[in-house]
Image (cartoon, grey):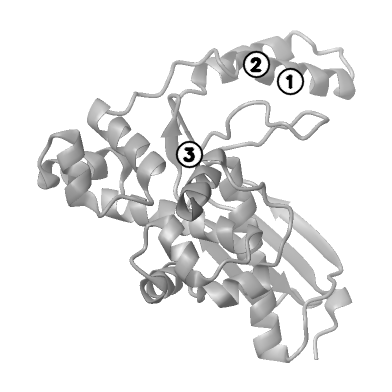
Amino acid sequence: MLDLRQCALGIEFGSTRIKAVLVDGSHAPVAQGDFTWENQLKDGVWTYPLEAVHTGLQHAYAVLAADVQAKYGQPLTTVGCIGISAMMHGYLAFDGAGRLLVPFRTWRNTMTGPAAAELMGRLAEERDASERVRSQLAFALLCELSDADSAAPALPPLVAAAIEDIRRNYAGLYGVEELSERLGVSKSHLVRAFTAALGVSPGRYLTNVRIEAAMRLLLHREYTLDVIASLCGFSGANYLCRVFKKTTGQSPTQWRAMAGRSALPELSPEQQRLEQELFI
């Protein structure tokens, strides 16, 4: 049996996965969980939605807790300490009310050179300042320079239109073929352009958006899987279960039971609109 008070929980927000690892008193890994995510280009910045941070962290922890239960026959009720590591190439800055100050920037952004040069120059001018003053100056400069760098290359208009269509109409889209028809291009051309720009096919992107929507409904509503499938664009509960398990490693029911109702944001306005339309 594990002495959970001697265990440490480590969480890493990596570039492709959020990882949760539990180590014992001898620093040996004893359980783990993870969540795969993909960054998106929004307003010229490669970033992750804050909702994905919440969803991914919750999922990774739920998988970790299930791993502890399966291996040791005990629930994960406490740990001795927790450590969180964000990506070395990104940061999340919040104000006192918990509002995100600037978009989270990922490794795909190549626009920090001018800001870094100016930051080092100004800090060098403050040689006699206290550490606290330097820290305050560094933070102020980061905020000031957050919009001063050159913008990331814009997405091709076709890809940007495809992303907008998917996010607005994921529940009603039959697939990439219909999406290409709506955009007035061939399916093969859309797939090539989309994959070249984002590193993921439009079909996979559509599936990820639907799975994300299903997760939020699982957390915030007591709907049956048939209803959730209808709201998220899946043909039925069986297909939802197959895709969900292939993507997350768990069935929707398992994921809902382990994730519970924690502090995820409520449904988006778009999801609330789809929910209302289903029952009108």
> Can you tell which mark lies on residue 254?
none
What's the distance in space between the residues labelled 3 and 1, CA to CA? 21 Å
Q: Nearer the viewer, residue 20 or 219?
A: 219
Query: Which residue is found at the position 23% from the left and 31% from the top?
Result: 158
Report whether residue 108 is seen: no
Crowd tier of the residue under label 1, counting other residues whose Cα lies within 10 Å: few below 14, some 14–19, many 20 or above: some
* Residue 172, percent from left and from top: 33, 50
Q: As drawn, is 195 to the left or to the right of 271? A: left
Pointer 3 residue: 107
Q: Are marks 1 and 2 in contact (CB under 8 Å)?
A: yes
* Residue 188, percent from left and from top: 11, 47
* Residue 261, percent from left and from top: 72, 62
Q: Which quadrant of the rendered structure holds the N terminus?
A: bottom right
- The three-letter amino acid code for the residue at tag 2 is Leu
Q: Nearer the viewer, mark 3 or mark 2?
A: 3
Q: Nearer the viewer, residue 75 or 186?
A: 186
Element under label 2? helix
Crowd tier of the residue under label 3, counting other residues whose Cα lies within 10 Å: few below 14, some 14–19, many 20 or above: some
Q: Is residue 265 above or below residue 157?
A: below
Q: Is residue 49 above or below residue 261?
A: above
Q: Is residue 75 above or below residue 112?
A: below
Pointer 2 residue: 119
Q: As drawn, is 41 to the left or to the right of 90? A: left
Answer with the quarter of the image where residue 153 lies: top left
Q: Residue furthest top?
A: 125
* Residue 29, percent from left and from top: 67, 76
- The three-letter amino acid code for the residue at tag 3 is Trp
Q: As drawn, is 180 to the left or to the right of 12? A: left
Q: Earlier in the sequence, mark 3 or mark 2?
A: 3
What's the distance in space between the residues labelled 1 and 2, CA to CA? 7 Å
Pointer 1 residue: 138
